[in-house]
Structure formats: C-alpha cells, structure tokens
Amino acid sequence: CAARPRTRGLVPKVMQDHFSTLQPVWVEQHLKLLCALRQVFGSDLDKPIILGVIGQRHFATVVEPYSHAEALQHGPPADMSRLTNVESIANATGIPRETVRRKVVEMVEAGWVVKGPHGRLSVTADATAALAGATDTANNMLDVTFEALAGALVADGLLKVEVPPADQG
C-alpha cells in the first residue's frame, strides 16, 4: 500500500507564493457559488448553511457505497437517530435556534427536508433537484480552482502531472 503524500499546509503556502494569480480565481469562483446559492435560496444565505448541515448528517448515515442520487432514492436513513435536529444545527452553526427552526419549517414546506421522529431532519431528492444548478457551479468552482492550484504546484516543481495522449479516435 503506497503512502499518501503529505499535503496539509501546502495550499496556504502556494496561495501565498502565487497570490496575484490564485486569489482572483479563488474569489471569483466563490462569488459565483454564493450568487448561485443566493438565487436558489431567495437571498437567504442561512438556508444553504442549515441545509448543508442536514445533508452532511444525512449522508454520514449512508453506509452503502451509493452515489448521492442513489442514497436519496432510498429516502430517510433507517437509523434516524444519527441525524441532526434544530438544536444541533444552531449549536454547530451559531445561527439562533429560532431562526434555524423557522427556516427548517420553510424547507419542509418546500419539500427539501423531511422531519422524522424526535425532530430528526433529512434531505430529500427535491432539494438535490432544486440545487442542481448551484451544484454544477460548485463543481465548476472546484475544477477551476484545482486547475489553478495544480498549475502553481507544477510551476513550483511540487507536482508532476502525466497527461494521457489525445484520443486518436
């Protein structure tokens, strides 16, 4: 089994060394994602944070190697006790409990969240569908940012990239 390369702390160094080229990419991509989320959530940026916590806890309970869509097709996990609730979200995010409660009610009404026993919360496939554009934006953000970071790492001799030959078909 090959050892994993030690990469913790590498990004801050590369960002510092290549600030003038990487910072504009980083900021531009984050602004695109924030704008996409703002549009989906009606200018309410607390909701994606809250839904993110619910989603993280939901997918942490999935033990089968499902894709994201497959995991949601199965509905709420069988073990709902491992899911989050309003109080936990408020504690984790610093968003006031009443604000979390009110926004969760709105997301339940929109069909994005299911509330189970003891107030346990789970995301739905409807949330995934509603967020498809923002998810594409996030994936593009990661792609563009990774490309810029990888380019800086290659320039510094810290990363070697082998490009496969072009398809001759």
Image: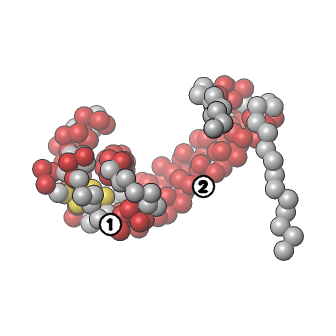
Chain-order first, disc 2 or disc 1: 1
Q: Distance from label 2 to label 1 (Cα)?
A: 28 Å
At a point 32% along the width and 66% down the height, the residue shown is 74
Q: Amino acid at mark 2?
A: Asn
Residue 150 place in picture, x, y as percent: 72, 41
Residue 122: % across, % down: 27, 56
Q: Secondary structure at mark 1?
A: loop
Residue placed most toward the observer, 43 or 139: 139
Residue at the spot of label 1? 74
Give residue 2's position: percent from left, percent from top: 66, 36
Q: Quadrant of residue 117?
A: bottom left
Is residue 55 something one can see in this rendering?
A: no
Q: Quarter of the image holding residue 167? A: bottom right
- Asked whether the beta carbons under mark 2 and mark 1 sit within 8 Å of each other, the answer is no
Instruction: Single out the residue that lies furthest toward the front.
Output: 1
Regarding mark 2 in the picture, which secondary structure is present there? Answer: helix
Q: Which mark is residue 10?
A: none
Residue at position x 85%, y 59% in the image: 165
Q: Label 1 amino acid?
A: His
Horizontally, residue 141 falls left or right of residue 150, namely left
Q: Of the residues tagged 2 and 1, which is closer to the observer? A: 1
Foreground of the two, 53 or 68: 68
| Residue located beneath label 2 in the image | 140
